[in-house]
Image (cartoon, coloured by chain):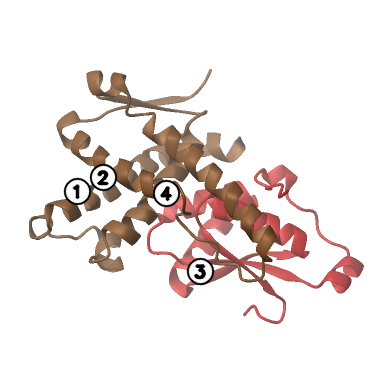
């Protein structure tokens, strides 16, 4: 029997974050969240790697966005399964890296790591980006807590 | 085509001394980033490199505290496959030849 984790989200809290997450997802269409750091890889080989990584990244992000379908907007429920968990947990990583790099440059690493951010002091766009960053981390934690072994053994 | 080694059972086998002497020894080094969760990095090390919980946590802490950790050492081709797979999981991985790694 397939392992499945269902989570009920508060629509009024989550819906406003989806625009930010979608914007981050769109910005990942043609760029890697964690660019290749390997200088040793030759040009042609490097391009092939980047292409494959980008295709995988976009597929993963698509799996995450698919959670927020019409059923979610009707009920508030999303489901993580052994089939989608791996892609979603990776997509959250990609989106958090992109949010950090492009949408949250004014916050320090320490503030982001500790979560000790004065929300009321932030502009609305930054506040939404930070809340999206935290929301995606929460999704990752739920998946790792409940589906870690399914991902590792797959 | 890169064949990503993501299943611990299919991890590269130890190399023979002759092969290593001819091709040189390469290290896969994971660099710190301020974004990925510690629990995520531990899971990725277990998944990609086949580490047990203790070893995965040790390397994660090394990355977190020292900024880098050598997570695998061996022939270049297999080191590249590991680095590619770690990048699929959005960890920053680099290759270093034996003389470069500390």
Q: Earlier in the sequence, mark 4 or mark 1?
A: 4
Residue drawn at x 60%, y 47% as measured from the top left: A52
Residue at the extreme right? B18
- Name the residue that disc number 2 marks: A20
Q: Is residue B11 left or right of residue A68?
A: right
Host chain of mark 2: A
Helix, strand or loop at label 2? It is helix
Quick one: which chain is red? B
- The residue nearer to you, when weighing B95 against A9, is B95
Chain A shade in the render: brown
Image x and y of residue A153, in percent? 61, 37
Residue A31 percent coordinates (x, y)? 46, 54
Marks 4 & 2 on one chain:
yes
- Quadrant, the C terminus of chain B: bottom right
Nearest-to-viewer mark from 4 and 1:
4
The residue carrying pointer 1 sits among few (fewer than 14), some (14 to 19) or many (20 or more) residues within 10 Å by Cα, namely many
Q: Earlier in the sequence, mark 4 or mark 2?
A: 2
Count neighbours of disc 3 (C-alpha within 10 A) and say few if under 14, some if 14 to 19, many if 20 or more: some
Query: Disc 1 vs disc 3: which is toward the camera?
Result: 1
Marks 4 and 2 sit apart, C-alpha to C-alpha, by 13 Å
Direction from residue A52 to residue A91 in the image, left or right: left
Mark 2 or 3: in front is 2
Q: Which residue is mark 4?
A: A28
């Amino acid at each position: 029997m397939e392992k499945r984790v269902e989570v009920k989200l508060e629509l009024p809290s989550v819906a406003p974050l989806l625009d930010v997450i979608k914007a981050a997802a769109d910005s990942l269409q043609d760029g890697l969240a964690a660019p290749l750091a390997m200088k040793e890889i030759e040009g042609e080989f490097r391009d092939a790697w980047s292409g494959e990584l980008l295709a995988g990244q976009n597929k993963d992000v698509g799996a995450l966005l698919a959670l927020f379908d019409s059923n979610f907007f009707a009920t508030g429920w999303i489901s993580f399964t052994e089939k989608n968990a791996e892609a979603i947990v990776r997509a959250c990583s990609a989106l958090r890296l992109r949010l950090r790099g492009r949408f949250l440059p004014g916050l320090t690493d320490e503030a982001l790591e500790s979560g000790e951010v004065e929300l009321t002091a932030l502009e609305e766009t930054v506040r939404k980006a930070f809340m999206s960053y935290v929301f995606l981390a929460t999704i990752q934690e739920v998946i790792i807590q409940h589906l870690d072994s399914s991902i590792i053994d797959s | 085509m890169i064949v990503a080694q993501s299943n611990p059972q299919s991890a590269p086998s130890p190399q023979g001394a002759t092969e290593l002497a001819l091709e040189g020894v390469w290290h896969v080094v994971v660099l710190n980033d301020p974004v990925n969760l510690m629990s995520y990095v531990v899971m990725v090390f277990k998944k990609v490199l086949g580490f047990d919980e203790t070893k995965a946590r040790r390397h994660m802490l090394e990355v977190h505290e020292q900024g880098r950790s050598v997570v695998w050492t061996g022939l270049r081709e297999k080191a590249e496959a590991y680095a590619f797979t770690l990048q699929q999981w959005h960890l920053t991985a680099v290759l270093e030849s034996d003389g470069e790694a500390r």
